Image (spheres, rainbow, N blue to C red):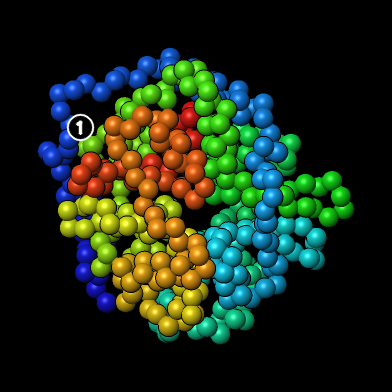
Amino acid sequence: MIPRFPVSKTPGISGESMEIDGDPFHHSEAVPKILEADVELSRHRISVFLSTHTAYELLPESGKVVALDVTLPVKQAFHILYEQGISVAPLWDHDVSRFVGILSPLDFILILRELGSHGSDMAEEELETHAISAWKEGKLQLTRKFDGNGSLHPRRLIDAGPHDSLKDVALKLLQNKVATVPIITHDGSVPQLLHLASLTGVLKCICRHFKHSPASLPILQQPICSIPLGTWVPKIGESNGRPFAMLRPNASLSDALSLLVQAEVSAVPIVDDNDSLLDIYCRSDITALAKDRAYAQIHLNELSIHQALQLTQEASATYGFFNGQRCHMCLRSDPLHKVMDRLAIPGVRRLVIVEAGSKRVEGIISLTDLFRFLLG
């Protein structure tokens, strides 16, 4: 099936038709120039705070953390994540009595793409019979991670202890390009899983600490368009050199998943013919296909993004997870502190930068983008 929205020979990717003439902020009013001294001072104070506070501050007063045994069938794991309303889970190996990895939406994306690439219907039996451990071994063949001797090797679990500094936790998340790091204590004979740390929690600590002394971080009042932050549509704001991808709602789910994997992004804005924001498709949305075993009944290249998003909303509403807002937005004129406050809200991993009024997409800022800037 040929995608209905091919652009520049790459299925579903947009961005070159963006205009800036109608940009209400693109006028003679000067954008405040950011001072390098202000940036360095702010980064230093944030670094000092993160270095002197530990991961204990990330632990909630109450709550649960779901972990999965590596012997579980992939299908069962898929359903557990969906029913629990979570996107990731640590993996426990009883044979070695330790946590050995993380099951994430990317795993399910790769599984569905692999099953779909064989030219046959996605067989539910294959998900039923394959254990998580078998999938992880097979994944090595797909991702082809090699060590210095040219042999395949598994990626070790990236974790942290409760006494590790917040800066160490943030750097582990950034440097290893992972969305979560398990906080594990080894005080007893068996490791105890305390929490799943993310950049959201670290940012919440920063915002809480500097809330009553905003003047100590001079960059907080700077508009985001004056800061080298995020990924921007060409010719608008500062670009970090990465391509900016968008999809139309009639693009196929196959196009979306390919884009998420190949571009190594966690979400893609869904826009209309004027590049105005309609919705957003995220890696974690893939778990919605567990509802009524939809993954066993669809073809990735025949299901449109619009239809996939309908499944996501229906699935979320079934378990009470849908809160009515999927797209979190900001304006290029918004100050940095406002962006930080929004990204510190649990579940908000990115903000789409839009033009006021038209909601035309101008860029996107993720938690990862923000921390790369804050930590220099």
**Between residues 349 and 4, which one lies in front from this camera angle?**
349
Residue at label 1? 25
Q: Is 224 left or right of 122, judged from the image as shown?
A: left
| In-front residue for pair 209/293 | 209
Residue drawn 52% across the image and 47% down it:
346
Residue drawn at the location 34% of the way across and 45% of the way down: 329
Q: Is residue 173 above or below residue 268?
A: above
**Which image quarter holds the N terminus?**
bottom left
Q: Amino acid at mark 1?
A: Phe
Circle 1 crowding by C-alpha within 10 Å: few under 14, some 14–19, many from 20:
some
How far across and how far down the image is residue 168, in percent? 64, 35
For this view, does 154 lie left or right of residue 253? Answer: right
Q: Is residue 156 above or below residue 3?
A: above
| x and y, in percent, of residue 54 in the image | 69, 34
Residue 152 seen from this side: no
Residue drawn where x is 61% and y is 75% of the image: 76
List the single residue furthest toward the top.
37
Q: Is residue 183 above or below residue 104?
A: above
Residue at 80% of width from left, 60% of height from top?
A: 97
68 or 112, nearer to the observer: 68
- Using the rendered image of the protein, determine whether residue 5 is visible from the camera's viewpoint: yes
